[in-house]
Amino acid sequence: MNNLMIACFLLALCVTEISAVQEIPSGSIISIQPDATDFPSNAQKLPCILYIRESDYVNGTDGSNWECQVYGQDVQSAGAPAESKHTMVNIQGMDLVLAENPSVQSGLTTLFAKGALLASHTLTIIESNELYFGEVASSSASRRRRLSAKSGNLEVLAVRVSTNDAALAKSAAEISDDVFGTHGDAVNFKSNAEECSNNAVIITPASGTGTNPTCVDGPGFFGAGYDPSNALADCSWFAFYGGTCAAFGDYRDIAGGSETANSACCTCGGGVFANYYAPIVDGVIDLHLNVDSNGLDRFDLEDLAENYLESIFVTSDLGSIFDNIMMFVPSGTFRPTDNSYAWIAYAYVRGFISVYNGDGQVAAANTHLHEVGHNWGLRHASDEDDPINVEYGDVSGVMGYSTGLYDEEIYGNKYCFNGAHSWQLGWYDANNVEIDALTGCYVGRLAGVQKLPNLENDEIIVLKVAYPANDFYIMYNHAVGANAGTAEAQNQVTITSKTTDINARTFLEDQLTSGNHVTFTNFQGSGIDLTVWVRLIDSSADGYAEILVFPGNFADRLDYLNIDEQSCLPADSTSEPNSGPTSG
């Protein structure tokens, strides 16, 4: 398979770059126009955006799937509702994609598989298909928001979805209270996100009026016919094949309208910057869909809701207006893989949409933070030793399995992120420290996130022990304040790992109480041992954990029991300690 091909088509017009526009944020993919005589009509015609969809289920299982968001004519080929402008499709043959390009990134990488067929919400890729990769355009307003949407002022829209045969018992006002705390709910998604981030994130309920920040293609343009057979060239086509506006931009609408690509399509200099007036109250919009949802594929319901929202906000890219959209849908939809109705929620990694099933998930603030955490780029927090669920068995942080519908009563619905995810979010960068795993040494105090911004005595939040391809993260899981409801390793020092793969999950490596240590023998095949020793834990409200990290085996390095905290070297190697730590 070729990674890149430059080809000429249509009257010797050569495509060397694809411009970035609102309708198809495809970046600079280079490809050719598939000839209708060479490929079936349902062959992929435009690039799609790759996403990982993370789903959580009532029985404690999970699902992580690669999907692709298709646009233009590919939407109907995929079997989506006629009014859909885009839809998510499963990928059959994703192993071929990853073999060709193992560096694909959810929410950022685009894929065009020449000759691949679309049907029944599935893109089927076989070995003979040529694959082309690109990135969502850096000029895309949606991409800019998504890449920066882990900090700053984030505008969040909550959507209360109802259908002809189903509705949530909770009102829009109750959803607003559970998500934003607008009517006195003290523990909610907004409060948790702001407390965990030490206000690095400020959640702002969405407003109902505004002007789209990016150009919107004119809705009345069906498409132009650029050859005697009147092959369809809609705004998506012009966007994908850069340079075509000059040649075909004045061709009139094939449906008989007066619009042309030059007047209607943003990529050709047309389009509009539209105002919107939406009935949003306290960050929530009531959205009624004229369908029956009981027995409906949950992804079809999501498609219908998203397309209806796009009509309300006069845009083809809701991500250019909102940082996050949280959809609350009535129970009764199913996941198509096994017809199961027992799903909790799902979200797209580095996307902007999360979806919650039924009234039980409206008040689950930790589930909200978990799913939006996926939007912020986080994968599940795993534990290979968990007897129930490895995928998200680390429940010291919110990216593990949600502890259920009773969190508010049991835990207060309050806990934050493990060490690896805390580092990835970047909220505590000014208070984090990195050392080399084989040559570095650290002695000092870890504080819990609730102590920010009032750290003292050179306390830090996360210690990163860096090693090629797989880093370790050490953090004090202090069960107070914003993290009071942590469901595992309360008031212990946790060690989590994450590879340098941006799409990777995290793994809980160990959890240590006061006086305990762990030695990682032959650390990651380096030939050198790595020891983490927790010398002291103070679990009071303003407490801390005092740790020592050094290369070597604990038993062989007793000189570190009497340490000089300034130099991280033995202060007096002749000193004999009164007692040592227990084995971890």
Image (cartoon, rainbow, N blue to C red):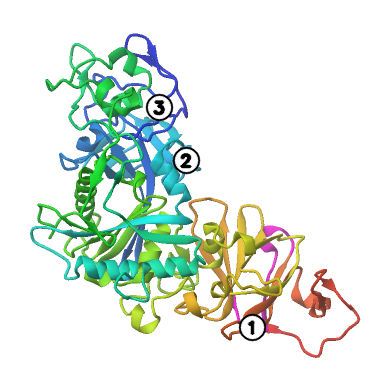
Q: Nearer the viewer, residue 155 or 102?
A: 155
Q: Which residue is mark 1?
A: 537
Q: Residues within 10 Å of mark 2 (few under 14, many from 20)?
A: few
Compare marks 3 and 2 and give the one earlier in the sequence. 3
Q: Which residue is mark 2?
A: 99
Q: Residue at x 31, y 69 (%)?
A: 182
Position of 555 with respect to 9 (left or right) is: right
Compare marks 1 and 3 and give the one earlier in the sequence. 3
Q: Residue at x 70, y 64 (%)?
A: 522
- Hey, what amino acid is under mark 2? Ala
Q: Which residue is mark 3?
A: 19
Disc 3 is placed on an element classified as loop
User: Disc 1 vs disc 2: Cβ atoms closer than 8 Å?
Assistant: no
Position of 136 with respect to 548 (left or right) is: left
Q: Nearer the viewer, residue 83 or 497?
A: 83
Spatial CA distance of label 3 from label 2 is 27 Å
User: Any mark on residue 564, and which?
Assistant: none
Q: Residue at x 71, y 60 (%)?
A: 435
User: Disc 3 vs disc 2: Cβ atoms closer than 8 Å?
Assistant: no
Q: Which residue range is magenta in the image? A: 511-528
The residue positioned farthest toward the top in the image shown: 11
Q: Residue at x 29, y 60 (%)?
A: 283
Quadrant for residue 167, please give it. bottom left
